[in-house]
Image: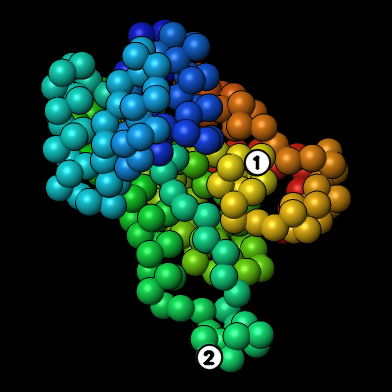
Amino acid sequence: MELEGAVVLVTGGAKGLGLAIATHLQGQGAQLIVADLDAESLGALPESIEGHVLDVTCPDDARAMVKEVAERHGRIDILVNNAGVIHSEPMVNILNPAEMMHDYDRFRNSITANLDSVFIMTAATVEQMVLRRTKGVIVNISSISASGNEGQTAYSAAKAGVNAMTVTWSKELGRFGIRCNAVAPGFIGTGSTHKALSDTIIEHIQSKTPLRRLGHAVEVAKAVTALIDNDFMNGAVLNVNGGLTI
């Protein structure tokens, strides 16, 4: 799909990795709409990027916003499901006997933020694509953690689910001319990564990565662009991790 003139919706696109993706796609000529829960960051976006305050875990709000955007712009060509929250918590923490086991509420919250949100936004967007006969593209932002990362039970489970949904949707939606792919970044040097991981862990990750560094957000954005641009890419999970496997 040509990005020039395409209408693109990026979730969680007001800062960090999402903003890098949105900015990069806009630089390729796309018309950008960003949905994010952070109203302050949305207010700091350039005027050329349309911002909407949205809780992507709320189905009714998501469906209403997507419908309004599709009606005003005539269509949505591309959805990038970037919104999510990194959550790290061991299954068993013997250093905290009072709360030794992984908390179930935090597990559920992580699943909701990282998996349910992708389902909710995709369902709302695909509905508009099908109704308007738009041959669109869905790109899900997964993670290297989908293969199972120590200390990230909930996050890993959610991202594994994202990968499974990506492949499932590629099979179901292809008949409508809608492609679905995912990008699975390794450890990217964003604020959320540094917030979720200690300096010691980050140094360890860098030492195990063949390129000996964290990734750059723009490198993930370029991978998103590649999946949009190639019309025969469908059901792919593109790894962008510098050679690191976990």
Earlier-in-chain disc, 1 versus 2: 2
Callout 2: 10 Å neighbours few (<14), some, many (20+)? few
Name the side, left or right, on which 33 lies relative to 25. left
Q: Quadrant of residue 241?
A: top right
Name the side, left or right, on which 218 lies relative to 134. right
Instruction: Please report the residue visible at 45 percent of the width from the left and 15 percent of the height from the top.
Output: 26
Give the labeled residue for mark 1: 188
- The answer, for residue 166, to whether it is visible in the render is yes
Where is residue 109 shown, x and y percent of the image? 38, 64
Instruction: Please report the residue visible at 33 percent of the width from the left and 56 percent of the height from the top.
Output: 116
- The answer, for residue 78, to whether it is visible in the render is no
Give the labeled residue for mark 2: 98
Task: Name above or below for residue 79 compared with residue 116.
Answer: above
Which quarter of the rendering shows the N terminus?
A: top left
Q: Quadrant of residue 13?
A: top left
Please say if the residues under marks 1 and 2 sit with CB atoms less than 8 Å apart.
no
Q: Secondary structure at mark 2?
A: helix
- Amino acid type at circle 1 is Ile
User: How many numbered marks have been drawn onto this rendered protein structure?
Assistant: 2
